């Protein structure tokens, strides 16, 4: 008989040099649906961080010389364990993050896919031979850059850490991962899977604590050769500044405020339903969440009615309850932020066509919200809301829509609904975003490069571009004769 999945919340530990360790100081981890404490997380001391740095150096010395095929096989074995354990991992994620269990399961599978894609890429970090004179060879190598300090946020507890660990390990780097203190279980499960798959000690190290203390300890250390971060633009800027003082390169996946251009030729009702579902996914706490809708005035009323109706119908509740489509916000900060942004928009003259308020008094639940006719001076038109809200405004045509799409400092994802090739061409040419999707609100897959322009960051994760940051280009010039 198959063993039933272990649905208990995992014991929270640091993973350093291949060993799990606790700590004298701990932080609470809370279920955002109930506000009850579900675990305590050790805080890494400076000595723990020094141990992690030493372990990452030792791990790198082993891993960089491990044949790419062996690295690839080991990553695949770990990914297979994550797939086998997907129910228990998803259960932990729903407990600590609040998202519906089925969405947590899909996230775990997506995390495994990130590992599988990069496992394949591990064997394809090709260099090239440059044409040269007889007796001379110029050969370009891509070598692992070295130990990585990576920082992953709380909105996708499994797939966010997976991106960084996959990129580092596939390239032959070691990594010190600081995952989110609020949602640590995904990263703990990743580390367990790699431990069970036989990863050499020190290649993957996992720490938690006070984020600023950890980044200011790790980033200036000369053993760290790359800083990889996903999170807010403000923190990304701060970490980039810190890294630049040491000439350490960065990979920055930062915030977004994705425009959606809804053209007059589209299937309005289908676009409205798809938009409502996607805007409320993960309670809107997604950097690619469709947030700013610019809708052609001829179809504006129909679209607004459609997105309002479907948003209002979203089933909100504890993510472990069957049929729930949207859980709570992941923490109290987001609840406060949503309340403030919606109040500010309403005061500026926006119409709240559905939602706009907290649900109940226990748990960080917020109503799926649609704001219409929001003036440009409302804060929510400029600030990434990172919550369950769609902002819908009419436009006179494509030129106005593109100008308004580009009017924020962000440039991560952008979307369009249209069947006209000329409109698609215009959007791809002129919209400032690293990812443009037409008639789909999907922006990030293992096989496609993902990242931002402008204040949304620097570098790409996924696709064949995904390992570029984790490698360094070294050119060999080899003359047979001494010249
Ligand atoms: P925040 O800006 O304080 O933190 C964002 C992330 O950075 C968190 O994961 C946090 O642990 C980490 N962090 C903060 N200070 C750090 C430091 N000095 N060194 C290293 N890591 C540090 O805000 P928050 O309330 O946690 O999140 C809110 C905002 O963050 C949202 O509005 C959203 O814009 C952004 N965010 C973006 C993503 C994303 O996928 N791009 C994910 C989560 C949060």
Image: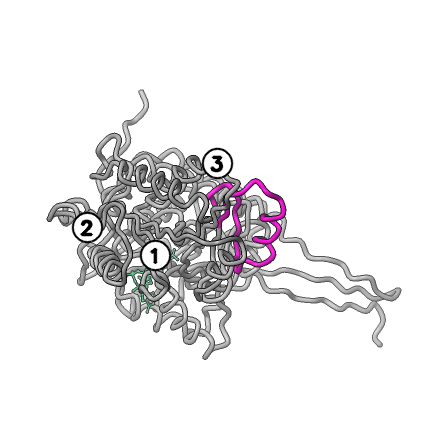
Q: In which quarter of the image is ligand 1?
A: bottom left
Q: Does the magenta stretch include residue 104?
A: no
Is 146 situated left or right of 178 in this image? right
Helix, strand or loop at mark 1: loop
Q: Where is the C terminus found, in terms of image quarters?
A: bottom right
Mark 3 neighbour class, 10 Å CA radius: few under 14, some 14 to 19, many 20 or more? some
At a point 43% along the width and 54% down the height, the residue shown is 258
**Quadrant housing residue 237:** bottom left
Residue pointed to by mark 1: 153
Is 110 situated left or right of 44 in this image? right
Helix, strand or loop at mark 2: loop
Mark 2 neighbour class, 10 Å CA radius: few under 14, some 14 to 19, many 20 or more? some
Give the total number of marks visible in the rendering. 3
Contact between labelled residues 3 and 1, with CB atoms less than 8 Å apart? no
Depth check, mark 1 against mark 3: the one in front is: 3
Q: Which mark is residue 267?
A: 3
Q: Residue 316 carries which label?
A: none
Q: Residues under labels 3 and 2: Cα distance?
A: 31 Å
Q: Does the residue labelled 3 lie within 8 Å of ligand 1?
A: no
Helix, strand or loop at mark 3: loop
Residue 208: x, y in percent?
A: 29, 60
Residue pointed to by mark 2: 357
Q: Which comes sooner in the sequence, label 1 or label 3?
A: 1
Mark 1 neighbour class, 10 Å CA radius: few under 14, some 14 to 19, many 20 or more? many
Residue 438: x, y in percent?
A: 53, 44
Q: Does the residue labelled 1 lie within 8 Å of ligand 1?
A: yes
At a point 25% along the width and 57% down the height, the residue shown is 342
Q: Residues under labels 1 and 3: Cα distance?
A: 36 Å
């Amino acid at each position: 008989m198959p063993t039933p999945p272990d649905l208990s919340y995992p014991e929270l530990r640091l993973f350093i040099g291949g060993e799990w360790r606790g700590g004298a100081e701990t932080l609470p981890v809370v279920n955002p649906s109930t506000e009850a404490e579900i675990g305590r997380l050790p805080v890494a001391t400076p000595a723990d961080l020094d141990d992690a740095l030493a372990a990452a150096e030792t791990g790198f010395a082993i891993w960089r010389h491990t044949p790419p095929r062996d690295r690839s096989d080991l990553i695949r074995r770990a990914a297979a364990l994550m797939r086998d354990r997907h129910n228990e991992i998803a259960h932990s994620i729903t407990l600590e993050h609040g998202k519906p269990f089925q969405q947590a399961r899909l996230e775990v599978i997506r995390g495994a896919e990130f590992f599988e894609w990069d496992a394949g890429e591990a064997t394809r970090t090709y260099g090239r031979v440059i044409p040269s004179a007889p007796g001379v060879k110029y050969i370009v190598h891509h070598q692992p850059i070295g130990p990585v300090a990576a920082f992953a946020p709380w909105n996708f507890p499994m797939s966010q850490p997976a991106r960084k660990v996959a990129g580092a390990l596939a390239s032959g780097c070691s990594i010190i991962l600081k995952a989110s203190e609020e949602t640590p279980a995904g990263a703990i499960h990743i580390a367990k899977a790699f431990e069970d798959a036989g990863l050499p000690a020190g290649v993957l190290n996992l720490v938690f604590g006070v984020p600023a203390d950890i980044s200011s300890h790790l980033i200036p250390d000369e053993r760290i050769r790359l800083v990889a971060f996903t999170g807010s633009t403000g923190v990304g800027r701060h970490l980039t500044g810190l890294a630049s003082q040491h000439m350490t390169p960065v990979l920055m996946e930062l915030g977004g405020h994705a425009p959606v251009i809804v053209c007059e030729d589209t299937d309005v009702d289908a676009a409205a339903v798809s938009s409502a579902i996607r805007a409320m996914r993960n309670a809107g706490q997604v950097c690619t969440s469709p947030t700013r809708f610019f809708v052609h005035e001829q179809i504006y009323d129909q679209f607004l009615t459609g997105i309002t109706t479907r948003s209002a119908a979203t089933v909100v509740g504890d993510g472990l309850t069957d049929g729930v489509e949207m859980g709570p916000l992941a923490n109290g900060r987001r609840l406060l932020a949503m309340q403030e942004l919606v109040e500010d928009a309403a005061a500026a003259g926006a119409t709240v066509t559905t939602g706009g308020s907290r649900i109940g008094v226990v748990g960080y639940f917020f109503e799926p919200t649609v704001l219409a006719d929001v003036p440009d001076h409302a804060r929510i038109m400029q600030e990434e809301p990172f919550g369950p809200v769609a902002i819908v405004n009419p436009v006179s045509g494509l030129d106005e829509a593109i100008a308004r799409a580009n009017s924020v400092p962000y440039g991560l994802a952008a979307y369009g609904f249209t069947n006209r090739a000329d409109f698609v061409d215009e959007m791809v040419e002129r919209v400032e975003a690293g990812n443009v999707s037409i008639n789909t609100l999907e922006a990030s897959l293992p096989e496609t490069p993902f990242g931002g322009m402008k204040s949304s960051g620097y570098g790409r994760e996924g696709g064949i571009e995904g390992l570029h940051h984790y490698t360094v280009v070294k050119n060999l010039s080899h003359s047979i004769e001494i010249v």
